[in-house]
Image (tube, rainbow, N blue to C red):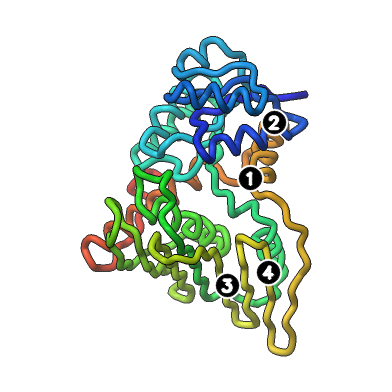
Amino acid sequence: MKLKIGVVGVGFWGSNHVRVLRELESAEVKAVCDIDLEKAKYVAKKFGVPNYYQNLDDMLNKEELDAVTVCTPSVSHAEITVRILESGLNVFVEKPLASNPDGCLKIIDAARSNNRFVMTGFIERFNPAVSKAIELLRAGEIGEVIMSHGRRIGWWPQRIGDVGVVKDTAIHDIDLTRYIFGQEPAGVYARGGSLRHRFEDHVQAIMTFEDELRVAFIEANWLTPRKKREMLITGNEGVISIQFLTQVISLEKADVVIEPILKWKEPLRIELSHFIESLLSRKKPLVDAIDGTKAVIIAESILESMKKNRPIEIDFKRFGL
């Protein structure tokens, strides 16, 4: 069985969605949509997609689809995703789920009321190096996890114009911290600001947890010339190092350093395959709308801490989570 998929927003990343989905045996891209009609036409022709649209409602009304992936600017995510859910379709939304918590909650409500699911696009969860790191963590290879340090630095991606480095870049490590630690952060203290861009372009954040035994450091900027995507996870019996771009991982223990050999695989392909398989098997995806919403709430807390220059308590209960 092939699921019929539509893609909304076919800029740099959306066109990658179309490319990957076209390669999956269990998916069929039936239509693409973009406010730039010429761009939609170009992508449709390039990848052999039969139909293209400028208006989302036209696509939803004219096409028989099973699901839609959303790759538009984050300020439009809530409105677009709710419209798709209300049309009876499941949705994959690129991070951040929405530009603020209220938008995220609207998506959750629409998904529940229409009995559909939403998957948030946190691609690093599907990075083979992360999957191996989680395997090692769950096997107790570094003992009790006490600290993580995520680092994402490099030039500003010109395609990003509606959010800053916290919600575009650091949000990956916000989500990974929840995933790795298996618990929610209780508070955050952050410093950062804007040196060259409209929104914040550098941040350093420390997230703390209720047990007061663990801490997560997050560093991100759009200023450093050389691009780096890396994370250290420290336990009381060892350290795991992850290089996200090259998918290289190392495990350092008291008397040995192990570097598992991993075959490089495209994380986007793994991620979208998971979305399709979740639909076919009617199972909850690994990263749902709740995960997306919690990441946005944490990101908002980081921005508030930067603004007020003081620690901020992260209160999920205030949002009904």
Q: Report helix, strand or loop for mark 4.
A: strand
Q: Circle 4 is placed at which residue position?
A: 249
Q: Nearer the viewer, residue 321 or 90?
A: 90
Residue at 50% in and 60% down: 173
Which of discs 4 and 2 lies nearer the camera? The answer is 2
Q: Which of 22 and 226 is in front in this view?
A: 226
Per the model, the C-alpha gap separating discs 4 and 2 is 30 Å
Q: Is residue 34 left or right of residue 316?
A: right
Mark drawn on residue 233: 3
Mark drawn on residue 268: 1
* Local crowd size for mark 1, using a 10 Å CA cut-off: few (<14), some (14–19), many (≥20): some
Image coordinates for residue 183, horizontal then vertical, percent? 51, 61
Mark drawn on residue 22: 2
Image coordinates for residue 8, horizontal then vertical, percent? 51, 28
Q: Report helix, strand or loop for mark 2.
A: helix
Q: Is residue 237 left or right of residue 71?
A: right
Please state which amino acid type lies under the numbered disc 2: Arg
Per the model, the C-alpha gap separating discs 3 and 1 is 23 Å
Q: Earlier in the sequence, mark 4 or mark 2?
A: 2
Q: Report helix, strand or loop for mark 3.
A: strand
Q: Report helix, strand or loop for mark 1.
A: helix
Q: Which residue lies furthest to the top in this view?
A: 62
Please state which amino acid type lies under the numbered disc 4: Ile
